[in-house]
Amino acid sequence: MSREIPSELIEEAVAAALRVREHAYAPYSKFHVGAALIDSNGGIHVGCNVENASYGLTNCAERAAVAAATSAGTRDIVMCVVVTETSPPAAPCGACRQVLSECDPTMLILTTNPQREDTWHTLADLLPHAFGPTSF
Ligand code: THU
């Protein structure tokens, strides 16, 4: 797939992120996050945040989605959708930017919320001068 991502596929990914957000396990923060990655073959891989009573063990939605894509056999990710409930929608945390960057530092990021306040970024904008596999 070229960098031109079909709008129907983007809508499918947003719907998947909205759906998986309902599975978020966030009894402590009550902040529910859903993420959906689009791979270079048009596949969609989802993740939600999973908290823990030992707070530091919390896993973010985006990193759960990277684990799902990796487990499905691909790390060739062209876009990441993140759904939160805030207005404006929240952007991925620093740890997630770093983990997404390992897949493709140039991927597109769409942050949105159920009201569809879509905000577009590139990962390079969110994580400039990234440390990566070729940095050492
Ligand atoms: N969270 C995510 O899932 N992704 C992010 O990029 C930022 C934060 C989650 C972690 C925690 O469960 C809750 O949001 C509040 O920080």
Image: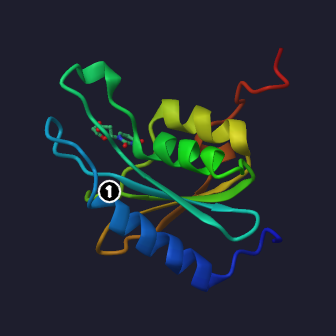
Q: Is residue 94 left or right of residue 86?
A: right
The answer to whether residue 87 of the structure is visible from this angle is no
Residue 116 to residue 80: above or below: below
Quarter containing the C terminus: top right
Q: Quick one: 69 or 117, which is closer to the camera?
A: 69
Q: Residue placed farthest to the top in the image?
A: 136
The answer to whether residue 36 of the structure is visible from this angle is yes
- Colour scheme of the rendered structure: rainbow
Q: Amino acid at mark 1?
A: Thr
Picture coordinates of residue 114 (x, y %)?
Answer: 30, 71
| Label 1 SS | loop
Q: Residue at x 51, y 37 (%)?
A: 96
Q: Is mark 1 within 8 Å of ligand 1?
A: yes
Residue 25 to residue 19: above or below: above
Residue 101 to residue 72: above or below: above
Q: How crowded is the residue under tag 1: few (<14 C-alpha within 10 Å), some, or many (20+)?
A: many
Q: Where is mark 1, residue-wise? A: 84
Q: Quick one: 64 or 121, which is closer to the camera?
A: 64
Q: Residue at x 79, y 68 (%)?
A: 3
